[in-house]
């Protein structure tokens, strides 16, 4: 009896994860209705906009690698043109979300360099610090770094993000850039 229960749980765990934790869908976005992937790393729910998505992706990647840090594994980015697509990955209010080192989901409101750079910085944080340490790091560090180093052009962000950016920039000035990630892990 116990063996059968274990087998049932084992067989249905992926299905349960897919149904209950929607961000996991970033692993196989083409299984989400209407989403297709032109490349391993660029997916969208509107194939007519693949070219635009590819330009945004390549420009953001180039910026982040040259000004923040190299990326070990380029993130998969799902560019949603509809709220329904964005919601199918479990996100509602934000303009974009990063799912650890698995990938990034961009909402219809997030199709621009600032949002994509911001999320790629979160991807780098997860790569360099590990997903658990990045998740447990202070909000001022995670969000402050992403707003600051993405060169977000908004002079004033909504609070608490303005304070996060200011605190990160103050901290960043005092850190040896060669030891940035070591220092970040120890926050």
Image (tube, grey):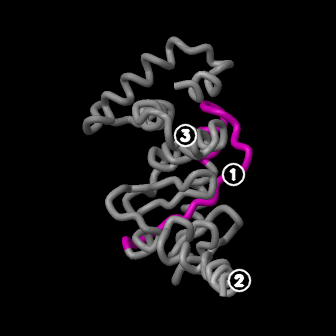
**Residue at mark 1 to residue at mark 3: CA–CA distance:** 18 Å
Question: Which label number is shown at residue 134?
Answer: 3
- Range shown magenta: 59-83
Residue 132: image quadrant is top right
**Residue at mark 1 to residue at mark 2: CA–CA distance:** 40 Å
Relative to 82, 46 lies left or right? right
The image position of residue 55, as x and y in percent, is 59, 55
Q: Nearer the viewer, residue 8 or 107?
A: 8
Q: Residue at x 46, y 55 (%)?
A: 97
Residue 91: image quadrant is bottom left
Question: Which label number is shown at residue 74?
Answer: 1
> As displayed, is residue 41 above or below residue 2?
above
Among the two numbered marks 1 and 2 on one chain, the one whose residue lies closer to the N terminus? 2
The image position of residue 166, as x and y in percent, is 36, 23
Q: Residue at x 62, y 57 (%)?
A: 102
Query: Helix, strand or loop at disc 2?
Result: helix
Query: Helix, strand or loop at disc 1?
Result: loop
The residue wearing badge 2 is 3
- Disc 1 versus disc 3: nearer the observer: 3
- Disc 1 versus disc 2: nearer the observer: 2
Among the two numbered marks 2 and 3 on one chain, the one whose residue lies closer to the N terminus? 2
> As displayed, is residue 7 above or below residue 109?
below
């Amino acid at each position: 009896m116990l063996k059968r229960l274990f087998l049932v749980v084992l067989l249905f765990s992926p299905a349960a994860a897919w149904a209950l934790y929607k961000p996991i869908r970033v692993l196989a976005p083409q299984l989400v209705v209407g989403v297709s992937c032109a490349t391993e790393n660029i997916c969208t729910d509107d194939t007519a906009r693949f070219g635009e998505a590819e330009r945004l992706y390549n420009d953001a990647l180039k910026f982040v690698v040259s000004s923040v840090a190299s990326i070990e594994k380029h993130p998969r980015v799902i560019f949603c043109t509809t709220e329904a697509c964005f919601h199918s990955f479990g996100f509602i209010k934000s303009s974009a979300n990063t799912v650890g080192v698995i990938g990034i989901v961009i909402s219809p409101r997030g199709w621009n360099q600032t949002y994509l750079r911001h999320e790629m910085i979160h991807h780098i944080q997860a790569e360099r610090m590990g997903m658990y340490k990045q998740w447990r790091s202070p909000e001022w560090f995670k969000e402050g770094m992403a707003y600051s180093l993405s060169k977000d052009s908004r002079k004033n962000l909504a609070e608490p993000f303005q304070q996060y950016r200011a605190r990160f920039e103050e901290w960043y000035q005092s850190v040896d850039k060669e030891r940035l990630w070591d220092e970040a892990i120890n926050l």
